[in-house]
Amino acid sequence: MDGIHPTNIDPQPKRRKDKGNPYQIFTVGIHTAHPRYYLSFVDSEGVKQCIEVSKALFDTFDRFELDDLSFLNEVDKHYEHSELTDASLNARAAIEPEPVEEIAMQHLQNERLHKAISALPEKQRHRLILYYFGGLTYEQIAEMEGCTIMPIKRSIDAAIKNLKKFWE
């Protein structure tokens, strides 16, 4: 092997590494007055190299390895490793999708409601739409139309009564 390669390497905790990690770091004499820090890697020609590095560079590589390990653990804990299908996603959904029959039934009921609303007299329809779909109050509608609250209330009540008749 080319380069300096110390033989009395300090023991290190075994770390899982990403498959793409091309280097290894280690120390010699970590508990002495003059510890030495090394970086080992395979160069572009396939020859294993070992170079001594500064403490700051060693700490940078060490921090990178720890961050990489943290990311690998995050992937293992939180990311899906199985094939995702519509069925498996629907099974885990917080809100289950509605069956097609229910969607079709709702659509038919909405059509029927729109037909019933469109059959109302103009004033009742207009006031009902403003109140229920526009979110306005009796007071706001009365102010818009320049009248008191009572005609608005009677008109909306009559519209609801007519819709109930249509629905029965």
Image (tube, rainbow, N blue to C red):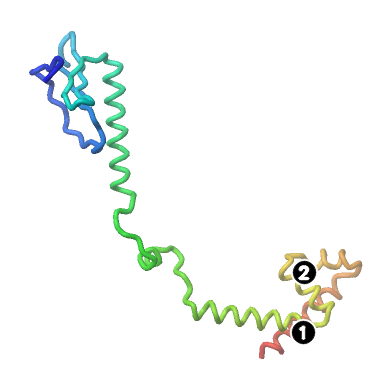
Residue beneath the point at 23% across and 26% down: 44
Q: Which of 48 and 134 is in front in this view?
A: 48
Q: Name the residue under label 1.
A: 119
The residue at the point 71 percent across, 69 percent down is 133
Is label 1 in contact with label 2 (beta carbons under 8 Å)?
A: no
Task: Give the left or right position of residue 64, taking residue 2 as reference.
Answer: right
Identify the mark at residue 130; answer none if there is no mark: 2
Judge whether 164 appears above or below 86 on screen. below
Whole-percent x, y for residue 80 in the image: 33, 53
Q: Could you say which disc has been placed on residue 90 in the image?
A: none
Name the outermost residue toward the top.
Answer: 33
Name, please, the residue furthest toward the left.
Answer: 7
Q: In this view, which residue lies farthest toward the right?
A: 146
Q: Nearer the viewer, mark 1 or mark 2?
A: 1
Q: Distance between the residues labelled 1 and 2?
A: 16 Å
Quarter-wise, where is residue 109 in the image? bottom right
**Quadrant in which residue 94 is drawn:** bottom left
Within 10 angstroms of label 2, few (less than 14), some, or many (20 or more) residues? some
Quadrant placement of the N terminus: top left
Identify the secondary structure beneath mark 1.
loop
In the rendered image, residue 38, in percent from the top left (x then y), is placed at 20, 18
Q: Where residue 76 sits in the image (x, y, percent)?
A: 28, 47
Going 18% across and 19% down the picture, which residue do you hit? 50
x, y percent for residue 81: 29, 53
Q: Is residue 7 left or right of residue 125?
A: left
Mark 2 residue type = Leu
| Disc 1 packing (10 Å; few <14; some 14–19; many ≥20) | some
Q: In which quarter of the image is residue 162?
A: bottom right
Q: What residue type is labelled 1?
A: Ala
Quadrant location, the C terminus? bottom right
Foreground of the two, 90 or 167: 90
